[in-house]
Image: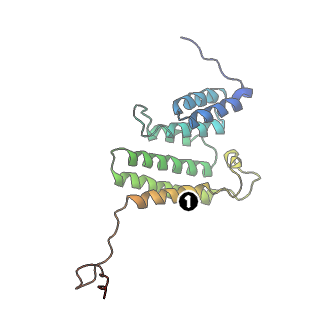
Amino acid sequence: MVELKLISKEAIPAALARAERYRLLNQPRMAESICHDVLRADPQNPKALVALLLSLTDQFGRHGYGVGIKEVKELLARLPGEYEKAYYEGLICERWGKALLSGRSSVTAALDWLRRAMSLFEKAEAKRPGGRRGTPPLERLRPPHHPARAIRHRRSRGRIRSRLPRRRPPVLKGSGGPPQPAPAP
């Protein structure tokens, strides 16, 4: 069997940039492969862990990919910091819920996953460190006052609302229906 060569530590930033490009080109398996290569060279690289997590969740619900939520959740334990764990667990739940909505799964199950995601985004925001100094490495990646959690929360709420049954306007007693316009004179 051919032994794979490890990439050098100096090549890691370029490899991660390439993985991001593959994700943007909708080729998550290529991005996943690159992330595994980076993690062989630097097993605790936080950017590689996040890129791998994202490339795996990009594969949710795709025919022939076979990536499950259990595999992705195993990566959470390797992330540094409580904020990162809560935020990315929320992201996993959101993407799993979206995959269920686009498939032939129960709408109720999908909505439960989206509600769980919203709860985790709120938990992540509560755990977010206040200042920039002494913050965990992944937190430093996010610019100050970045509204990612709030945006993801609103999008999840919108998906839930779009799937709930619409309420009909109340019918007034004795009228038999909504008010009718007066006849023209």
Q: Which residue is mark 1?
A: 122
Residue 92, how many percent across, how many down? 50, 46
Q: Given the image, on which type of amino acid does mark 1 rest?
A: Glu
Residue lying farthest front? Answer: 185
Secondary element at tag 1 = helix
- Judged left or right of residue 128, residue 104 is left
**49, 44: nearer the viewer:** 49
Asked if residue 119 can be seen in this view, the reply is no
Q: Residue at 56% across / 51% down in the picture?
A: 86
Closer to the camera in the image, 179 or 1: 179
Q: How many marks?
A: 1
Where does the image place residue 135, in percent across and percent down from the top left? 72, 51
Residue placed furthest toward the right: 133
Name the residue: 65% across, 35% down.
44
Q: Position of residue 124 (x, y in %)?
A: 59, 55
Could you tell whether 174 is left or right of 4 in the image? left
Left or right: 9 as drawn, with respect to 80: right
Where in the figure is residue 178, as x and y percent of width and height? 29, 79
**Picture quadrant where residue 4 is located:** top right
Rendered image quadrant of residue 78: top right
